[in-house]
Amino acid sequence: MQRVNFVKLCESAIVPTYGSEFSAGADLHNCEGDITILPGQTVLIHTGIALQIPEGLVGLVYARSGIATKRGLAPANKVGVIDCDYRGEIMVPLHNHSDEPQTVAAGERVAQIVLTPYITADFTEVDTLDDTARGTGGFGSTGR
């Protein structure tokens, strides 16, 4: 278990919570009142939480499967990246992919954050790259 310090930025903010013992993602909650998102609209949902993600980890913000599949609500950026040096509020740009207005209730779980290690790269320009069997094939080149 990794300790992550946080600050509540609004009184109604809810601490990120895990749904079960083996959940990888901790749920992020809407800290504002009820918010209606029209079809095709994206609304920035405030969680009221700022995190101190430990060095060497990144917070990846993903959709929650329930509201994504049943109501068409998912982060507009697909996966949000929260760097360990960011100290601002965690916000979720929630997009309504459905044909109906969707209301996000106060305190409702809107996304999930997964803390994971990352590797930084030293990008080095070279004249050629090593050959592979795949080569430059992409976009379906390995079959269906």
Image (cartoon, rainbow, N blue to C red):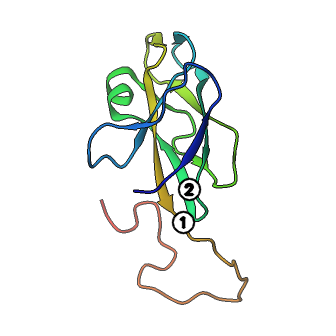
Q: From the top left corner, tell me how far across and down residue 26 is, in percent.
A: 41, 41
Q: In which quadrant of the rendered image does the N terminus lie?
A: bottom left
Q: Is residue 43 above or below residue 132?
A: above
**Which residue was labeled with disc 2?**
58
**Type of the residue with mark 2:** Val
Q: Is residue 131 above or below residue 118?
A: below
**Type of the residue with mark 1:** Tyr
Q: Earlier in the sequence, mark 1 or mark 2?
A: 2
Q: Secondary structure at mark 2?
A: strand
Q: Which image quarter: residue 144?
A: bottom left
Q: Secondary structure at mark 1?
A: loop
At label 1, counting other C-alpha atoms closer than 10 Å, the crowd grade (few under 14, some 14-19, many 20 or more) is few
Query: Which residue is more in the foreground, 63 or 27?
Result: 27
Q: From the top left corner, tell me how far across and down residue 52 is, in percent.
A: 62, 49
Q: Is residue 36 above or below residue 44?
A: above
User: Which residue is painted at 63% across and 22% down in the image?
Assistant: 10
Mark 1 touches mark 2? (CB < 8 Å) = yes
At label 2, counting other C-alpha atoms closer than 10 Å, the crowd grade (few under 14, some 14-19, many 20 or more) is many
Q: Which image quarter: residue 51?
A: top right
**Which residue was labeled with disc 1?**
118
Q: From the top left corner, tell me how far across and down residue 48 is, in percent.
A: 60, 28
